[in-house]
Image: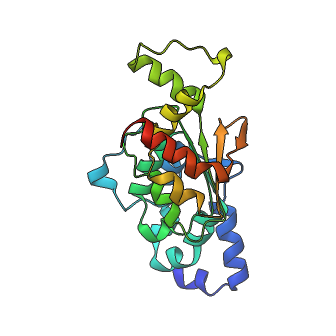
Amino acid sequence: MMTGFFNLPPKLRKRIYREDLIRDGTTSLTDFKADCGYATTVIWSWRRVAGKQMPPLLSAHVRFDAEAASIYFSANHFVMEDVNDLKTFLEVLQPRHSQMIRLLTVEHGASQGKDKETLGQLAGMRKARCIRVIVNERALAERHMRFDHAINWHWSLGMSDQLKLRALYSIGLRALPRLAKKPHIELCVGDRHESRTFDRAAIKPYVLGAAKYVQI
């Protein structure tokens, strides 16, 4: 049966792959779990699944992986709700699959990101066409308020420079300059529903100011 399928013309095989593997809309971490055959409520154990996850079609035969993996990972738009989801997503993929991703969006600020190096890994995705990193300053500021009761602030007051520096520090200072140099990475401020592009020219002094503020 496998032999018969691979005897089909390459264009027809590619069309079949696209019909099976490309999602309408975006693909979240939950959607990716479903694509890999897991219940969406399953919590992945890193030790058991690291570097092994892919849709069943790709794991059914080495030639399916060779021909169709680039279609799945390059044509779908992966949207991670926070840095924790991004960290899990990158950990469970085979490294060569992560290099096939072309469209990726991640919002930072919605939950505590424990790994400040995760965003830095995006700079190494050489084949990516567009990676959007959305810094949710409001969510980051509200999170700071929960841990620093000296901050007396409401969103209606807007973001002060000091508060922006605190929010920026939360996403990992070392990652931002690397990301800003990559033309395929778009840095935004806001959330997934409404965001504006970050001024790249302002990133270096912004980072230096934040570093001085937190005395790194």
Residue in view at x 42 percent, y 38 percent: 113
Image quadrant holding the C terminus, namely top left
Residue 86 location (% of width, % of height): 48, 48
Indicate the quadrant where residue 155 lies.
top right
Residue 127 visible? The answer is yes
Q: Give whichever of 179, 43 is nearer the camera.
A: 179
Tag count in the figure? Answer: 0
Q: Is residue 95 left or right of residue 105?
A: left
Q: Is residue 170 left or right of residue 21?
A: left
Residue 167 location (% of width, % of height): 51, 33
Residue in view at x 47 percent, y 16 percent: 151
Residue 29 visible? The answer is no
Image quadrant holding the N terminus, namely bottom right
Q: Is residue 141 left or right of residue 202?
A: left
Q: Give whichever of 61, 91 is nearer the camera.
A: 91
Residue 84 location (% of width, % of height): 43, 42
Indicate the quadrant where residue 22 lies.
bottom right
Which scheme is used to colour this image of the protein? rainbow
In the image, residue 25 sits, relative to residue 6, either above or below, namely above
In the image, residue 116 sits, relative to residue 179, either above or below, namely above
Residue in view at x 46 percent, y 75 percent: 61
Residue 25 location (% of width, % of height): 71, 48
